[in-house]
Image: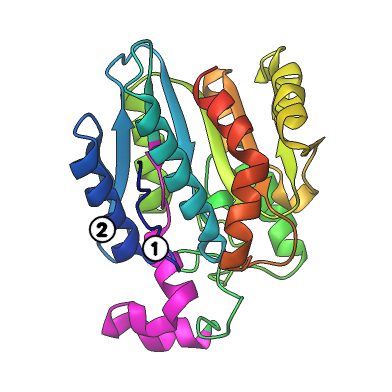
């Protein structure tokens, strides 16, 4: 009888890393590779299953700090793929926590950061429950990718966001943050054929950005929606541009999607994990094997 590993709740960076090591011990075909380090020096780990580098499927989670539940969905997907066996016609790369510092701050407040950064983080409201989405420099990573960044910065400034903040500040320049650069550099080093960014919440699928959106992307999004009951949608203006899937589509003209997992108010409670997985597992597995 198969015994599933126990997922770490909440998904602190240390607990996620420990779970990944345990999964690697159980499934030696699974590789763990660091693609970079966060502002505070935490490793940004990639979990790689499969050896065919000509077709790489990338799934990224916890870009936003309070959305740490997406890390658990990514890990559950990773374990499900491991159980299916090593793919022969692709490699699947999963980044469970793109923003480990932010997750640590969201869970534990400023005390999770180095001493010299704590007072500054507290001044921004890092210790207010449910507030922190940024990295340890107060930059919203999903506003920091170089796709429509200048226009997004102008929208931020119109609502008074002009410097580091708990959310929605895109930095003083695109790719200013080591976490953003780590993802971009990975895509520059290897040929990622399709990308899926896991966020929360809303049960929506975002599929397009600009003129380089693949013509089949809408049909793929509708297929994913049919498998999950999610809605194909477009984000609000302050969530358009600057994002991971926006940058990926604009740079490479390949499939890039954002999933807004679950429904409610961030942070979603841990009790939502099972219902979210039950509703999305078929969709996530289908994306990984497209």
**10 Å neighbourhood of mark 2: few (<14), some, or many (≥20)?**
few
Kindly identify which residue carries mark 2: 18
Residue drawn at (42%, 51%), measured in percent from left and top? 98
The answer to whether residue 244 of the structure is visible from this angle is no
Residue drawn at (49%, 73%), measured in percent from left and top? 106
Kindly identify which residue carries mark 1: 8
Q: Position of residue 13 (x, y in %)?
A: 34, 63
Secondary structure of the residue carrying numbered label 2:
helix
Quick one: 150 or 240, which is closer to the camera? 240
First in residue order: circle 2 vs circle 1:
1
- Give the number of callouts: 2
Q: Which mark is residue 186?
A: none
Q: Is residue 171 positioned above or below 207 on the image?
A: below
Q: Position of residue 45 (x, y in %)?
A: 30, 46
Horizontally, residue 178 falls left or right of residue 277, namely left
Task: Give the magenta part as a residue range.
Answer: 94-123
Q: Do tag 2 and tag 1 residues touch (Cβ < 8 Å)?
A: yes
Quick one: 87 or 257, which is closer to the camera? 87
Quadrant where the C terminus is found in the figure: top right
């Amino acid at each position: 009888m198969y015994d599933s590993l126990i997922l770490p709740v909440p998904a602190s960076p240390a607990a996620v890393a420990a779970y990944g090591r345990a999964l690697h011990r159980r499934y030696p075909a699974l590789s763990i590779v660091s693609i970079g380090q966060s502002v505070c020096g935490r490793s940004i780990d990639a979990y790689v299953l499969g050896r065919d580098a000509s077709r790489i499927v990338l799934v990224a989670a916890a870009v936003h700090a309070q959305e740490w539940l997406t890390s658990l969905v990514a890990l559950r997907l990773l374990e499900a793929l491991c159980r299916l066996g090593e793919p022969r016609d692709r490699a699947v790369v999963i980044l469970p926590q793109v923003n480990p510092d932010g997750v640590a701050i969201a869970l534990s407040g400023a005390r999770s950061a180095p001493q010299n950064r704590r007072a500054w983080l507290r001044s921004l409201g890092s210790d207010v429950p449910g507030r922190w989405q940024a990295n340890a420099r107060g930059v919203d990573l999903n506003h920091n990718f170089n796709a429509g960044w200048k226009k997004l910065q102008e929208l931020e400034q119109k609502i008074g966001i002009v410097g580091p903040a708990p959310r929605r500040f895109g930095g003083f320049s695109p790719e200013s943050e080591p976490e953003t650069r780590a993802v971009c550099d990975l895509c520059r080093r290897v040929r990622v054929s399709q990308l899926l960014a896991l966020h929360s919440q809303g049960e929506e699928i975002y599929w397009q950005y600009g003129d380089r959106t693949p013509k089949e992307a809408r049909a793929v999004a509708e297929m994913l929606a049919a498998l999950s009951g999610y809605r194909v949608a477009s984000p609000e203006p302050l969530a358009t541009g600057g994002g991971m899937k926006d940058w990926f589509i604009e740079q490479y003209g390949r499939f890039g999607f954002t999933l807004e997992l679950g429904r409610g108010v961030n942070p979603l409670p841990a009790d939502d994990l099972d219902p979210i997985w039950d509703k999305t597992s078929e969709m996530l597995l289908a994306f990984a094997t497209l």
